[in-house]
């Protein structure tokens, strides 16, 4: 699994999440990011073209060296500095109250201790700061949810720890955030992996 998770999986994620449908979601839900932005699960830099001119600096949390290497062309084109700040959102190496906006796009599904990561995000946000998020998670349909629970152990093995069945909105609220906007909807594809939670928390 070492070679697969270190070299192959980052390329697969880059390919899957690089489609036009995902780009439309990034354009819609990352528009409010501004100032100093912390993006957890930065990946291969797919979000960079969709940040507004209000962003002055981006601090990236990314565990994969291969994904960071794949991100270099996008980083070079970015109109603001991009810095890899750390490798895990569960321990963010930044002082409290140091970022204006946090971004999580298809990331909370994978972090082993997502609750701890959300608490860390809340710690480093300035008063009045916000979290912009696009995540897949637990479906409201009982039949779909049952299959999500059944298949999550397999999904975790083949997709780098990804959970199909996390209740994203409840997790964000449990970390002390208020949900300013939450849109919940399916996108095209198998229902077990295409129910999205997207919006903004403060």
Image (spheres, helix red, strand yellow):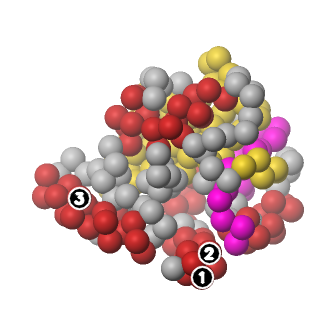
- Vertical arrangement, residue 37 with respect to residue 173, above or below: below
Range shown magenta:
47-66
Mark closest to the chain's N terminus, 3 or 2: 2
| Residue 171: assigned label | none
Circle 1: is it few (<14), some (14-19), or many (20+) Cα within 10 Å?
A: few
Looking at the image, is mark 3 or mark 2 nearer the viewer? 2
| Residue 149: assigned label | 3
Percent position of residue 141, x then y: 17, 51
Q: Quadrant of residue 190?
A: bottom left
- The reply to whether dot 2 and dot 1 touch (C-beta < 8 Å) is yes
Q: CA distance from mark 3 to mark 2?
A: 26 Å
Q: Residue 13, can we see it?
A: yes
Quick check: 45 left or right of 174? right
Circle 2: is it few (<14), some (14-19), or many (20+) Cα within 10 Å?
A: some
| Residue 3: assigned label | 1
Q: Residue at x 45, y 38 (%)?
A: 115
Label 2 element class: helix
Looking at the image, is mark 3 or mark 1 nearer the viewer? 1
- Vertical arrangement, residue 182 with respect to residue 62, above or below: above
């Amino acid at each position: 699994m070492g070679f697969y998770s270190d070299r192959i999986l980052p390329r697969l994620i880059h390919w899957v999440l690089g489609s036009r449908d995902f780009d439309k979601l990034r354009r819609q839900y990352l528009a409010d990011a501004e100032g100093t932005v912390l993006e957890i699960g930065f990946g291969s830099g797919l979000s960079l073209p969709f940040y507004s001119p209000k962003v002055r600096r981006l601090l990236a949390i990314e565990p994969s060296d291969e994904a960071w290497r794949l991100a270099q062309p996008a980083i070079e084109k970015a109109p603001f500095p991009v810095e890899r700040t750390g490798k895990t959102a569960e321990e963010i190496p930044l002082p409290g109250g140091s970022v204006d906006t946090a971004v999580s796009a298809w990331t909370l599904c994978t972090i082993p201790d997502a609750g701890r990561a959300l608490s860390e995000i809340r710690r480093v946000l300035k008063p009045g700061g916000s979290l912009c998020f696009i995540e897949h998670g637990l479906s409201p349909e009982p039949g779909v949810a049952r299959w999500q629970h059944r298949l999550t152990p397999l999904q975790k093995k083949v997709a780098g720890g990804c959970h199909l069945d996390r209740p994203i909105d409840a997790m964000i609220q449990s970390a002390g955030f208020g949900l300013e906007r939450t849109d919940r909807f399916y996108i095209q594809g198998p229902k077990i992996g295409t129910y999205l939670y997207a919006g903004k928390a403060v």
